[in-house]
Image (cartoon, grey):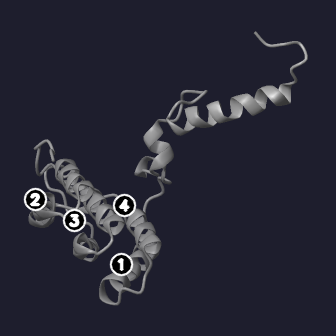
Amino acid sequence: MMEENETSSSIMKRLSPTLFLALLTGCSLGGGIEPHRVIHNSRADMPSAPLGEKEAQAAVRVLEARRQQGNVSVDETVRALETLSRWVPEDSDPFIRECAPYIDSVVPLFADPSEDVRFHAVETAGVCGCQRIERELLRTRETGSSALVREAAAESLILLGLGDDVWSE
């Protein structure tokens, strides 16, 4: 039990490392945030505003510069891919999904030297793709250079309704 002369600051000094460790390992006092939300800023945390044409064109210019000249940072490229992930298809026919108009700028990044760029490109393809890119996603799922990217490719295929295989390493 706590001694009477123990102050609140000394209690905090003892509890701070414990609280930090609890928060770091995914525990939360409010129980509201899932651990993966703290570590990875997923699309669920992004603004839900639809993607504007000018915004999409600016993002595509970043992807093209990364692909052609390689003079765009990984962070800029990832931000551009996350921006393009906000594309909402105009589903005229619920059984036919059209690719986003800029998907041809995303697919070449499946082979980018950066694992982070490859992962986000494959993830964006799961939101913006269609049957036309199935072959590239299958190739990435089978021969991708990292398990993270192969798993993302499998998940993208499932999101697009092009596969239901459970990914396994």
Q: Position of residue 91 (x, y in %)?
A: 24, 55
Q: Are dots 2 and 1 in contact, CB under 8 Å?
A: no
The amino acid type found where label 4 is placed reads Ser
Q: Earlier in the sequence, mark 4 or mark 3?
A: 4
Q: Quadrant of residue 130?
A: bottom left
Q: Which residue is mark 4?
A: 85
Secondary structure under tag 2 reads helix
Q: Position of residue 159 (x, y in %)?
A: 22, 49
Q: Which residue is mark 3?
A: 99
119 left or right, relative to 73: left
The amino acid type found where label 2 is placed reads Glu
Instruction: Give the label on residue 63, or none.
Output: 1
Q: Is residue 40 visible?
A: yes
Q: Earlier in the sequence, mark 2 or mark 3?
A: 3
Q: Earlier in the sequence, mark 4 or mark 1?
A: 1
Q: Position of residue 160 (x, y in %)?
A: 19, 52
Secondary structure under tag 3 reads loop
Where 116 sits versus 46, above or below?
Answer: below
Q: Earlier in the sequence, mark 2 or mark 4?
A: 4
Q: Position of residue 124 (x, y in %)?
A: 31, 61
58 left or right, relative to 24: left
Q: Nearer the viewer, residue 15 or 139?
A: 15
Callout 2 crowding tier (Cα within 10 Å): few <14, some 14–19, many ≥20: some
Q: CA distance from mark 2 to mark 1?
A: 24 Å
The amino acid type found where label 1 is placed reads Leu
Q: Nearer the viewer, mark 2 or mark 1?
A: 2
54 left or right, relative to 17: left
Q: Which residue is mark 2?
A: 142
Callout 3 crowding tier (Cα within 10 Å): few <14, some 14–19, many ≥20: some
